[in-house]
Amino acid sequence: MIKKSTFLLAALCSVVSIAQTSNLDLPNVSAIAVTNPVGIPQHSTSVTVVRGPYLQSGTPTSVVVKWRTDIATQSVVHYGKTLNSLSKKASSTALTTEHEVTLSGLSPNTKYYFNIGNKAGVLSESASGEMYIITAPKAGTKQFVRAWILGDAGTANNNQRNVRDAYYDYVDAAPKNSGKTDMMLFLGDNAYGSGTDEEYQNALFDIYDDMLKKSVAWSCLGNHDGKSADSATQSGPYYDIFTFPSAAQAGGIASGTEAYYSFDYANIHFIILDSHHTSREVGGAMYNWTLADIQNTKQDWIVTLFHHPIYTKGSHDSDTEDRLIEMRENFMPMMEANGVDLILNGHSHSYERSYFLNGHYGFANTFNPDEISQGGHTVGSNGYGDGKVDSNGAYQKASAATEGAVYITTGSAGKISGGDLDHQAMCVSLNQLGSCVMEVEDDGRGGQNLTVKFLRDTNGIDDYFTINKSGLALKADRNESGQKSTGLFFDADKDVVKLNLDKNDKLKKVKFYNNIGKLVKKSRKKSINVGKLPKGLYVIEVITNNKAFTESITIE
């Protein structure tokens, strides 16, 4: 039987929310503050922790804890809601230097302290309580969220440290939710020059050690990471270091690979793509998965990140480089049509931020600043404005709307490299060091604001914008009949896909692709029996004499 796209592969939702300092202001988080040290004897043998601990693949009910030791030993994590009572334990008896332990059965939006060790005792702990997990809220929860966004950070130099320290100062002094960092979002090129294990040690773990112990790090693959990694086999330092949800453990639908994946956090859906190694073709495995994933989220906000920027005239040029052009021309029409709100890229070592856009997939000189209603590429009355609440006003977007997204190139968390910085779709272009902060919060009028700030290495905020969404409680869903477009209808009772084309459209071909992008069925009929297809996710491509469109379904 065919059902409209409600994917049963979607699992428990979202990432682990982690805080930055001890002076937390976290609404709806269950935690008990204590000051007593952990009552487990310190291990005194020669085993030494040389990396970590750090947190990965967080959900409302689980998190992965990873670390490295100098010699092989067992893996033990003690954890609990109070620092002096780490009464729960997760462990592995296998002897290894690369430790990975999953804590499961956790409560959503709850703080857990932890330590790491082996059978003999504790190897790493924090008497002051600076090693902890705050599990993610349940998917759909509307609460304050803060993400730290780092593009091309991996220089392991003072530029990177200054950008880091500026964020630490910002979050500690924030007037609202001080100390709260729910996640780190890396936009690739996390370790220069070739993404080796040693370079990751210098540029990731040595620089962000304090944050990694209490904030889940998510990432996409950059070209420098990709020099020593292979997405096809998911091998190399990048894939060894990071653990990402390939089976929808953190929300979304299963991708079957750590090269691209999705996760939910609160009421935000994050889509992470591999623009370096994986095929960027329409109808490819990543394209089909992305379409299915974005069409089946019920989250209020959709944020996408991948390495190669859609629009840039910095150290790279989106008018001349293949990967950049292909992501813009192939992926953006599909993602914009399905409601993406924010696109985050690195690669160019600068900060560039677009107007409120929809429908611009050409070169820089083809950008038309007029509103969509006038045949242009910007959305709303101030889409060509600055998006600032205290200036031209926030960009406006209804909860059920698809039109309107902001594109950010932010690849200066470790170095700047100049360039013309004159892309016509970008309203702000800066050759300055810095990182970005994304914050989602109530607007006080029944909606929410998504605000992104560019935070300089010198502590100043050189740019910001806000997207406002009203009526988030009225999030639209598919109608009960299963009608997803004017051209495709699912008859669940008869196991038939029916096409309802315009009278001027002549059907040429219908193609069915499975969840790995393989073509499994063709037809030239408007009524197609799919009862013999295996259960699972499919993308349907419909081609007529006038147009082509795709839709995703699940056969159950």
Image (cartoon, rainbow, N blue to C red):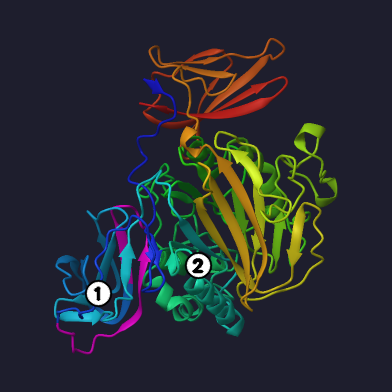
Quadrant occupied by the C terminus: top left
Residue 57 on the magenta segment: yes
* Of labels 1 and 2, the one closer to you: 2
Residue placed under numbered mark 2 in the picture:
175
Residue 421 in sight from this viewpoint: yes
> Residue 115: which numbered mark, if any?
1
Choose the circle earlier in sequence order: 1 or 2: 1
Dot 2: element: loop
In front: 185, or 347? 185
Give the magenta-colored segment's residue range: 41-66
Q: Residue at x 20, y 79 (%)?
A: 36
- Estimate the x, y position of residue 324 in percent, counting from the top left: 69, 54
Dot 1: element: strand
Within-10-Å neighbours for mark 1: few <14, some 14–19, many 20+: many
The single residue placed furthest to the right in the displayed view is 365
Within-10-Å neighbours for mark 2: few <14, some 14–19, many 20+: few
Q: CA distance from mark 1 to mark 2?
A: 31 Å
Q: Residue at x 14, y 80 (%)?
A: 120
Q: Within the image, what quadrant is residue 157 found in? A: bottom right
Amino acid carrying label 1: it is Asn
Residue 61 on the magenta segment: yes
